[in-house]
Image (tube, coloured by chain):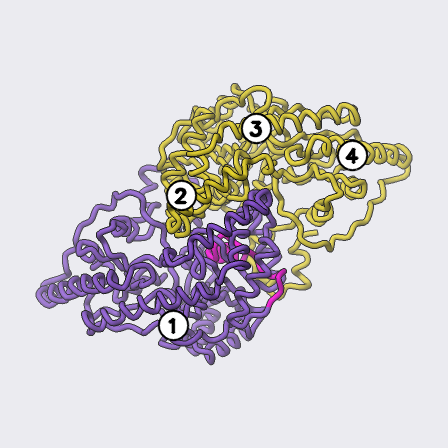
Chain colours: A purple, B yellow
Amino acid sequence: MTISSEGTTLDPWYEQYASRTAGLSASEVRALFAVASRPEVVSLAGGMPAVSALPLPVIAASMERVMSTRGPAALQYGSGQGTPELREQILEVMALEGIRAGVDDVVVTTGSQQALDLVAKLFLDPGDVVLAESPSYVGAMGIFRSYQAEVAHIPMDADGMIPTALSERIASLRAAGRSIKMLYLIPNFQNPAGVTLSSERRLAIIDIARSEGILIIEDNPYGLLWFDRPAPAAMRSVEDDGIVYLGSFSKTLAPGFRVGWALAPHGIREKLVLAAEASILSPSSLNQMIISDYLAHADWKGQIDVFRGLYRERRDAMLEALEQHLPDLTWEVPNGGFYVWVGLTEGLDSKAMLPRAVKELVAYTPGTGFYADGQGRQHLRLAFCYPQPAEIREGIRRLATVVRGEQELLETFSATGPIPAVAYDPHVAAPPPNIG
Amino acid sequence: MTISSEGTTLDPWYEQYASRTAGLSASEVRALFAVASRPEVVSLAGGMPAVSALPLPVIAASMERVMSTRGPAALQYGSGQGTPELREQILEVMALEGIRAGVDDVVVTTGSQQALDLVAKLFLDPGDVVLAESPSYVGAMGIFRSYQAEVAHIPMDADGMIPTALSERIASLRAAGRSIKMLYLIPNFQNPAGVTLSSERRLAIIDIARSEGILIIEDNPYGLLWFDRPAPAAMRSVEDDGIVYLGSFSKTLAPGFRVGWALAPHGIREKLVLAAEASILSPSSLNQMIISDYLAHADWKGQIDVFRGLYRERRDAMLEALEQHLPDLTWEVPNGGFYVWVGLTEGLDSKAMLPRAVKELVAYTPGTGFYADGQGRQHLRLAFCYPQPAEIREGIRRLATVVRGEQELLETFSATGPIPAVAYDPHVAAPPPNIG
């Protein structure tokens, strides 16, 4: 179901939308996710951080300090680029991943999602091509589509994007006369695939992008949330001029603040600030100041360690349950982040299976959302970030029941036609956003 | 100085920007405003609300209550449309201006600036025309330009936009084959002109827009901040399907939260939510919940009365000082809002005069920023919202010194050529955003 198809019958303004608006469609599984948000469903779908593990009194104390010492400034408009204090602190956060930069080149945004939206707005004309991993983040592809750009997926393996495949795709796109504007990557604990781009490949891909004159967008929300060993140094740590780096406090602190950032080469940064001001005037002074106070007073690195331990435990619970209940499926072991990308057995369809899963009170994200080209039916994404380990184990147990049922149906009916779809009611209230 | 002209020499990515990015230029007076933010300068330039008049302990108590009772939800991602609780309360706020609507048709945004940006993104193709008052809000015109639309200014008088002029302009644009996508209006205490659209003209303009099939964008940040008598009922109170209404907590509460909203017809609202999610995933849960708590516990209507009294006093101080020191200039008396729009005597140039004003330690906004077509040199905008009455009086006294000096120069040199420009250093740090 797309909104635009509804519009033809119900919306009197339908003829007047911009051409880019045709690319704006509701997620196919949006309505189903609304059902899946019921408490009896174990949701392995959304990428919501485990904010209940945060030290709430510590954060509340930061709010109180900001209001008692700098209340009027916190409640006022601020710089379109973000407060100098927070931008200085962001340099410290990025230094943990090897990045050295100047405070002038950081732009604070309403989550890193907005940073990506603004970069896309600055660069993408209709018909332009964005190179991205295969699969890639659904929210990024939504942005690229909203500026009428096309995504060309580059194959990955367990070490991330394959440089030779990248070179070949660039050559074939250029031969076809296409304009390639950027290479979008999530090098660490990729969403959805969970894999990490190796150090060697980071260098190889930087070389390719540099020689081809293609801007790299390095999206790194999960980098500090590693489990077994730290991620390789950020791509931005070895290349300055050719990379826009995107960071976020949504996973290392909390998404409710909506504070992220871009680190961009000087000329792009100047335009980013202008585009940000046109879009929202300035990011929330209050939220920036609360985060600054938290970073100054709290053990924020220790809190990241807490998150790392907690997510590692949940990943382990998920992998153990998968081994136990679904050993015939395939996955890579993620060394950080929020997700396990699961390959189904031949003939299963993650999108068709989802209504049955929700009936069994477990939800996941079908693989189809992570491709711009219709792939993904044989994969699904499981998020281990939000549910407790016991819930994760129960969720995987339920998922196994669904998968077994589908496999049996497939055996029974494989000679007689497709599996009949299970109906669900799309007219449900308050769907959640496409988080993660 | 535009950023794009710098880009040709310094920015290696200059050739790759989207065509829309050519429209993204820094304000001509941006650098000068950075100078004007020094404490010794009386700034009558920016539209910053008087947040120091807020009950800070009351707001701090709301923060504390949110954190102690709903901390994890406040720190988590939320609905892309905004929390149902705040959307219900927004209905109560809008009811004060005669608007009846459903909670489903409200979309909470990162300030109403973002709402306007998203509406523009949904509707504007390159070359489309937006009708707007003459003059109009600089930040709106920046948004329209960022989607490569053109602004056609419709003349105003003391009762706001002139309906016959609107009809004529629509006819001439249509005759020229132009696509008119929307009519952007600030009916109450307009920014920058300070005038209010009369009740009769509201109805006349709604009729014209309806019969011509043109969507109205009613931008109403100041409506509740009236001085002598309430503003007429909102245009949205008499027309549902043809109006997107924009509201904000930035002026009735505080801009540091960055919380505004759009109220839109159903089909547009559905697309707005999708566009908002693509752009920022969801608005800040924390800030929405703090505002909800404030609206539920504090005397928010009484606080708006406080603001009304305070701004009325400042307006009066400004008008008295203008009468006293600059009686040969012209202005309309604003019945609310933040601004007085001042007409200069023949031959003066508000843009050329600004460096001299800053040298005299007073700042204003030249009229040129409020027109898309190069008009405005004979006007300037004075904001009375932020400085104390004594500062306002001193600022106008300084401004009078500058105006007298310009007038004398003009008399002396009028036969011999233009007034020589005063140099200033554009390389100054930390410019403020284009607030107001």
Percent across and percent down for residue A365 are 29, 59
Up-down: is A110 above or below B254? below
Q: Amino acid at mark 1?
A: Phe
B321 inside magenta stretch = no
Query: Which of the marked residues, 4 or 3, is nearer the chain's N terminus?
Result: 3
Specify whether A411 is left or right of A368.
left
Q: Which residue position is annotated with label 4?
A: B399
Magenta: main secondary structure equals: helix
Q: What chain letter is assigned to the residue under label 1?
A: A
**Do circles 3 and 2 both sit on a common chain?**
yes
Distance of label 3 from label 1 (alpha carbons) = 54 Å
Q: Residue visible at 49% across and 63% down? A: A299
Secondary structure state at the residue bearing disc 2: loop
Few, some or many C-alpha atoms within 10 Å of disc 1 (few <14, some 14-19, many ≥20)?
many
Front-lying residue, B183 or A138: A138
Region in magenta: A101-124
Give the foreground label among 4 and 1.
Answer: 1
Q: Which residue position is annotated with label 1?
A: A227
A116 inside magenta stretch = yes
